Amino acid sequence: MVELIEKASSILKKLGVEKYDIYALLGEGTTVEVKDGAVEKLKSSQRKGVAIRVVIDGKLGFAYTNDTSEDGVRIAIECARDNAQSCEPDDYVFSTPSENDVGFPLADEEFEKIPTERKIEIALELEERARTQDRRVERVRKASYGDSFTTVYYYNSNGNSFSYSTTNYWLSILLAAREGDSSQIGWDYQSKRFFSELNPVEVAVGAASSAVELLGAKPMKTCRIPVIFKNRVFAELIEALSSAFLGHNVLRRKSLFADKLSHEVASHVLNLYDDPLHKDGTGSAPYDDEGTATKKKAIIERGTLKNFLVDLYTAKKLGLNPTGNGIRPSISNPPTCGVTNLVVERGALGLEELIKTPKEVLLITDAMGIHTINPISGEFSIGISGIYYHDGEKVTPVSGMTVAGNVKELLNGITEVGSDQKWLGNVCSPSVLVKELTVSGE
């Protein structure tokens, strides 16, 4: 691939293109799905591609190809050059060389040594562990294992050049539990950088517990009540809210935080970081996808909005410094503003202590419709399930309810942040206690 990039650079120079960048990707992975002790799906995949950006007379052209032959790259270059002609001139810049190091291995050296049989075994173990975890687990709908090995290559006309490799392994499971006439769905997910860190027992316990604890659930009466968003649920909420922190949405006035930089937007107990240098994050990398060195930066610090996440183009338009958040959703997309790893800083209290803090509290363990949060107004209405506690003791599981309001009210109402951090993809969060929200039921 390095030789191909050198040839692409040579072609660009011969065509008289003075400003350009080349982004290439090689990847492979395996997915295993099992059910009832047998393999339902086994898939191996490979990814490769090259993306070209050129700037000609101030106009940006982009093209990509999955054909990594010299002819394939040549055609992509010609397409990028042609595409530039139909664009309006703008102030485009490319990254300059810089040194950066995440400080830990990004790739598992054992990746190629793991036999397919072992991958199947761990998926089957996950299913069996979940099935035998509790007598009320009626069936496992799907247990899955997946992995990926990805290498990124980058070069631009400023002489900025680098490559790095990353690995990711994950387990997920969906199951159903039943007791009498009551049935509930449970699930859990885990992703790790190293195969040796996968823990099917932990995932099985998490999924079984999430279903069993809600058996017999029914709606409560509508009320205003303290609410705890369990770590996984709050991670989902932060992920849904993340688009409001992206520079291109701020630029287009499609963010409820557009005018709030350096203003208080949340409770002083909340700290949220974009951390591409976190050893446990699946989004960790020394450089973003347009060659800018990455760094940890605060988004919300002690309740104050500190940074938007910007790429080079948006940073210039907003008059901000680049943050290393030029992310390509895929090889077929040019870089745009995106997140690396979103991390809600942990607090001091465990979940049990959070539950005992108010006299009564609703612990939300599952939510539906989180991604319908309006990123401009902040309005939301989410279907929820959970457990009602009084004086720290479990009273009853609840379901068929909604919690509604505005993100601003929710963030400002946080009174405690827990210590029980959990990763959900590239988002990490502990549980959080909100002083009071309206929950609607009977």
Image: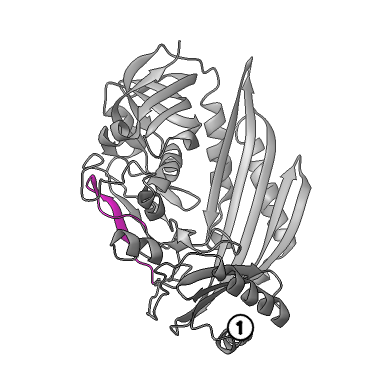
Figure check: 410 above or below 159: above
What is the count of numbered marks?
1
351 part of magenta stretch: no
Figure check: 69 above or below 361: below
Q: Residue at x 71, y 72 (%)?
A: 67
Q: Which residue is mark 1?
A: 8
Give how far across and how far down residue 418 sits, in percent. 32, 41
Colouring scheme, one of rainbow, by chain, secondary structure, one colour: one colour
Residue 117: which quarter of the image?
bottom right
Residues 307 and 30: in front is 307
Q: Quadrant of the N terminus?
A: bottom right
Q: Quick check: can you spot residue 135? A: no
Give how far across and how far down residue 204 sits, in percent. 58, 41
Q: Residue at x 37, y 39 (%)?
A: 431
The amino acid marked with disc number 1 is Ala
Residue 388 shown left or right of residue 162 in the figure? left
Q: Quick check: can you spot residue 205? A: yes
Span colored in magenta: 293-309
302 part of magenta stretch: yes
Q: Residue at x 58, y 60 (%)?
A: 330
Give how far across and how far down residue 22 sits, in percent. 55, 76
Residues 345 and 373: in front is 373
